[in-house]
Image (cartoon, rainbow, N blue to C red):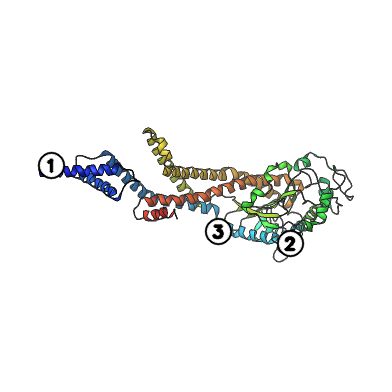
Amino acid sequence: SSRSAAGDRIGSAMAAIQKAASTTPKDRKHADVLRIKAGHMLTFDHLASNRGVTERQIARRVLRKSMARSTGCLSLPLTIAYFGFYITSVRLHEDITNVYFLESTVRNRLDAMFADAHTTNAVWDALLSTESGKFMDVFFSHVDMYGQLQATNITEDIWGDRGLVLSYNQIQGAVEFKQWRSETSDYGKPYSCSSDVTCALCRSNEGFQTIHNTINRAPIDRECNGARRLQEEESEDAESSEFLANDEFHPRRLHLGRPELRSSFPRASDQKVNDTFHFWLYPAEAREQISDRLRYYHERGWIDHQTEVIEIRMYLMNAELGRNRLEQLTVTLRFSEAGSVYYERDLQCYFLQFFYGNLSMLADGMFFIMLVLNTAYRLHGMWSAFLQSKLFRHLLNLHMAWEWLMILTGWWTIYGYYNMMFNWEPALLDALEPVHRRGWELGPERIAEVENLFDKGHIAAEGLASLRVVVAQYSVMLMFRFFVSFGSQPRLAIVLNTMKNLLTD
């Protein structure tokens, strides 16, 4: 009778637990929650007292949890090693400290150079003035700190110190001034030649007609000392003349172009290269000849109301700090329709030697090996899920998606390194070699070699700029990977759980 009474009590208790479990979570009372917890305890107690009877689903759940915890504990040191090798590899390739010493000084000089230029004439003043800190003084000084003229070629292999910028950087080839306009027709004010340099520019009409027209137009047969007018336009545009004559009525302030404003700027990429207007400055020439070139374009009105974008680009070589590097310096002036001018400067450093040393090769090799092993491990897991007909569920797992995103980004980084080592670097060195072979004999007659250097350098700099964005973002992604390993360890999971609970705030 006592056993039957106990059985009745257990039966009634289980019925109450079953009834509480059948209610929706919204309608459950506090007593129902307690009954459900009691049912869990009774179930586990029953499984513990009957060793031969084990629920398969619970055993699998416990085993999976244990395996996940073990995997997380083992992945933490591997994650630290993977992150360490990657950061070491990037740091040695980029040589951040020495690059900062170079680029920060150049940026400060450029900002000081264009900070007070609020009109078009002020921009020309910053380019033409010989005052200390201006464009001519910084990039075409041609004298050293003692006031002595800088030497050109000392030997066939030594370039001398001509074209030095801020003591340690040397201009390579020439300096390009390029302009995008709202119209591609020829333009320019009348001009009377006063020197051999301006006479040659006047005959070729360089800078005032597109590259395409310059190639396909016969030389102009006119007397050089006469008033030079355009072939196709006999009268000067009245609106342009008024704009250039009274520049103060069209103030164009120079602001640092911020990324959020770029959508409002005219796009230089909308026009093809053949639709641009450009001219060159040659460091091999005397400073007076370079000033004559710039003054010629100023007096003929190279910048007018149809100017949209102006780009000044040059290449600086620095072999004093660390590995030999080539720095692409680009100054961009964007003319908005509202009348303001927005100033941007961009420097892209390209190393002419890929590896920093043995440590760099070791870091790259270990990073590559760990990436291959991680990829093989994740492919094995994907294949196992496929054999169990759970591939779709496997790929939809947030952790797996994050892992594959990091793997693919890692391989994209390796692909960028491959391009740097086997594509961009050889092409850039091949383009740089004839420029060095000519030394300071480079002039308008050798412009094809300079253009080849600029084309190859621009391709390498664009690819490297995109790769640097991926490299920077990949380091942040790897830092977030630590939280996955933290979640598998009870004590470290406190940090992760705290951050998870704070997300609502």
Q: Position of residue 412 (x, y in %)?
A: 52, 43
Residue drawn at the location 83% of the way across and 53% of the way down:
242
Give how far apart the Cα atoms at labels 3 and 2 are: 32 Å
SS at mark 2 in the image: loop
Amino acid residing under circle 1: Ser
Residue drawn at the location 63% of the way across and 46% of the way down:
428
Q: Disc 3 or disc 2, which is closer to the eye?
A: 3
Amino acid residing under circle 2: Leu
SS at mark 3 in the image: helix
Q: Position of residue 55 (x, y in %)?
A: 25, 39
Q: Earlier in the sequence, mark 2 or mark 1?
A: 1
Position of 95 relative to 212 (above/below): below
Q: Position of residue 437 (x, y in %)?
A: 69, 49
What residue is disc 3 on?
97
Residue drawn at the location 55% of the way across and 55% of the way down:
95
Give how far apart the Cα atoms at labels 1 and 3 are: 84 Å
Apparent side of residue 127 relative to residue 47 in the rendered image (left or right): right
Apparent side of residue 71 relative to residue 227 in the rendered image (left or right): left
SS at mark 1 in the image: helix
What residue is disc 1 on?
4
Nearer to me, 322 or 85:
85
Give how far apart the Cα atoms at labels 2 and 1 are: 115 Å
Q: Position of residue 134 (x, y in %)?
A: 72, 61
Q: Are marks 3 and 2 in contact (CB under 8 Å)?
A: no
Check the picture and name the quadrant holding the C terminus.
bottom left
Q: Residues within 10 Å of mark 1 (few under 14, many from 20)?
A: few
Apparent side of residue 171 relative to residue 444 in the rendered image (left or right): left
Q: Earlier in the sequence, mark 3 or mark 2?
A: 3
Q: Disc 2 or disc 1, which is closer to the eye?
A: 1
What residue is disc 2 on?
149
